[in-house]
Image (cartoon, helix red, strand yellow):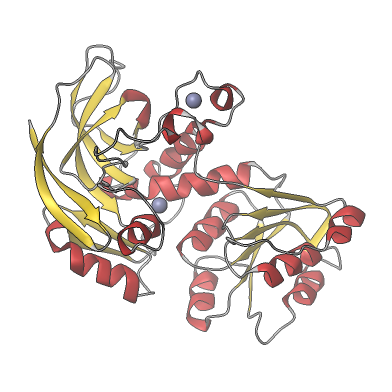
Amino acid sequence: MKTRQIIFNGVNDWEIRTIDLPPLKENEVLVKVEACGLCTWERDILSGREPADFPFTGGHEIAATVVEKGSNVDPDLKIGAKVAVAKWARCNNCYECRRGFDNHCREAQRPAPAGQAWGPGGFSEYLIAKSYEVFPLPGNNPVHFAALTEPMACVTRSIRRVDLVAGDTAVVIGAGFMGLLFLKLLKLRGIKVVVVQRSAKRRELAKQMGADLVVDPTSQNWVEVIKDFTEGRGAQSIFYTAGGPEMLNQCLKGAAIGGYVLIYAPLFETACLDVDEIHFKELVVLGSVRHDKESVREATSIIGDGLINLEDLNLEFCSFTDFDKALEKAINNRDIHRVLLTWDK
Ligand SMILES: [Zn+2]
Ligand SMILES: [Zn+2]
């Protein structure tokens, strides 16, 4: 079986190659990639912004259909089934997997043998995945939405890590693609959501997507606005997706007693945080990276069953064969939430 695949040979050097896929093992599933998101990670590796080894095969936001399965794969997984593929090793044996942090599985972080391509490989026509990496999409939503599973699973995991109940107030800092997913998933849980965002266009979109309040941090003291909104208490959870150290310190100020500040995006620098704000208000400051298997399962269920509206997200289809154009769109058109790559369109 042959497949076309996009391979990065070096910085700003990609090509479409055709490779032979190995025979399917008993616990593996052969899928046809129906759509794959073009995420910042792959773009940063290609541009050299994120140092990485080459050759590299990107594509980790994978929507697919099942073509063939190994002899030991769940009989309930049907040929032709719509699936999300979360290409991430979860060995179930390493310390982190056993401790419930399969998003840090040691197997997944083992370097590929020298000279061999590494990476999730979703920028392919056909792909072999471990059966545990394949998550069936329930319901009637079109298969391309399964490409949103991976980013959404990072969000479902983040939300699971904080203590929020219906009626609480949460703040989302930043209304980019991830910020909007936070907004939609928090609304689904009955949370009042305030979105803090500089761009008027993005604020308007957040409002349309259900934000209870949007705040421009450049013209308003957003911490005071949150206090007014919560009768002086502050927000039970604040999700930081962008903004820098100064914004993080404001998050500490905007959080209620016993509240959570979840750091979703890295700073890539050492920041000075107001520790007494954490101490005296008994705040929980925590991070969340990637997805674990439970968060992927939850995301497929939400997406497949149509529990949130995905139609209002600006998804742009591009052909894998037009990869340069896809990159150009993803980089320069900030209104596009995700470029979805397909082989046919
Ligand atoms: Zn991604
Ligand atoms: Zn493991």
Q: Considering only vertical position in the picture, is 83 above or below 47?
A: above
Q: Nearer the viewer, residue 340 or 305?
A: 340
Q: Is residue 255 left or right of residue 175?
A: right
Does residue 306 appear in the picture of this structure? no
Where residue 134 sits: x, y (%)? 33, 31
Q: Nearer the viewer, residue 63 or 121?
A: 121
Q: Considering only vertical position in the picture, is 332 above or below 128?
A: below
Q: Is residue 250 left or right of residue 39?
A: right
Q: Is residue 280 left or right of residue 105?
A: right
Where residue 184 sits: x, y (%)? 52, 57
Q: Answer with the quarter of the image where residue 69 lies.
A: top left
The residue at the point 64 percent across, 52 percent down is 190
The residue at the point 20 percent across, 60 percent down is 13
Q: Considering only vertical position in the picture, is 327 above or below 310?
A: below
Q: Answer with the quarter of the image where residue 315 lies.
A: bottom left
Q: Answer with the quarter of the image where residue 192 lies.
A: bottom right
The residue at the point 38 percent across, 74 percent down is 335
Residue furthest to the right: 280
The quadrant of the picture occupied by the N terminus is top left
Where residue 194 sits: x, y (%)? 65, 67
Q: How many marks?
A: 0
The residue at the point 37 percent across, 25 percent down is 132
Residue furthest to the bottom: 219
Does residue 310 appear in the picture of this structure? yes
